[in-house]
Amino acid sequence: MSMAADERNARAPWALAAPALMLFVGVLLIPLAMTVMLSFHDWGQYKGIEPVFILKNWKEIATDPYYAEMFWRTFRIAILTTLLTALLGAPEAYILNRMDGRWKSIFLLVILGPLLISVVARTLGWALLFGGNNGLVNKLLMSAGVISSPIPFMFTETGMVVALAHVMMPFMVLSVWAALQRLDPQIENAAMSLGAGPITTIRRIIMPQIMPGVLSGAIIVFSLSASAFATPAIIGGRRLKVAATLAYDEFLNTLNWPLGAAVATLLLVALVLIVVGSNALIERRYAEVFR
């Protein structure tokens, strides 16, 4: 009787996890596997997709410098966006953590508010503010005589970085804020009572303890920025393509699905390797924090 009960108890977790596991396999693993398989098929303008195993698409990506530049642009924009969100988000989270309860709730809602608005709407807002001669900020600055020509924003990497940083900022702030919850305020007070100045306290006491949060937020921001589509498509347009917009164009404009699948697969593999490697380094460096 006890053996049967033990077997039922052993099977219970699998039975409970089976629906979620089936959903995970059905909506994620199977489509990903089909995308990888599609990247090895052939395509022609008149013959369409041929289910043959070839390496033509991968050879084209490996040999054509256009794809190297496109992937380098994708990761360059993601890195700059991550650095910008870290430089602005970490102090913002620290200030938020030092606020009183009422003000903390209000400003936390302000930080999370952009997540309630569509990414497309937020990006179009940036385009209306800085886009060309008709952008509100450019018109005000030119009318005031501050600048003689509009600040380039649309179809520039700078515009993409700024818009993506605005979209990704809540993820960085929340990651750093969660790390600050582990910080004992008395440690900071003790350091200041022993003669440490504000800069020394931040550099020697606060930064080492919130660094895991900064790095965790950096991983999230980097992966989301590298795979972002809406913001690069609106700000960058067809002039500055990234991996996500290139895959979209190959699928829906040129109808070269195998090449688009190869681009998407390469982006996925690169992101998985970067995220897994970075996460392993962070957990090894800050093992005590993750215990």
Image (cartoon, rainbow, N blue to C red):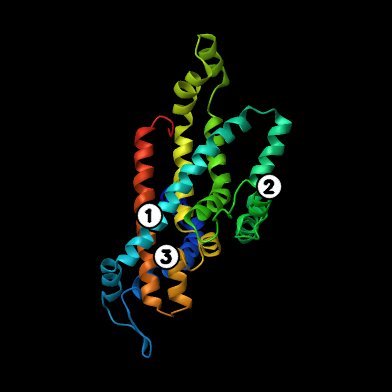
Looking at the image, is 121 positioned above or below residue 108? Answer: below
In front of the other: label 1 or label 3?
A: 1
| Disc nearer the start of the sequence (2/3) | 3
In front of the other: label 2 or label 3?
A: 2
What is the x, y in percent for residue 88?
Answer: 54, 38
Q: Tell me the crowding category of disc 3: few under 14, some 14 to 19, or many 20 or more residues within 10 angstroms, Cα based.
A: few
Residue position for label 2: 144
Say what amino acid the circle numbered 3 marks.
Answer: Leu
What is the x, y in percent for residue 169?
Answer: 56, 45
Residue position for label 3: 29
* Nearer-the-camera pick, 23 or 192: 192
Identity of the residue furthest to the bottom in this view: 46
Q: Regarding mark 3 in the picture, which secondary structure is present there?
A: helix
Q: Regarding mark 2 in the picture, which secondary structure is present there?
A: loop
Q: Tell me the crowding category of disc 2: few under 14, some 14 to 19, or many 20 or more residues within 10 angstroms, Cα based.
A: few
Residue position for label 1: 272
* Nearer-the-camera pick, 260 or 286: 260
Give how far apart the Cα atoms at labels 2 and 3 are.
56 Å
* Nearer-the-camera pick, 4 or 236: 236
What is the x, y in percent for residue 132?
Answer: 60, 60
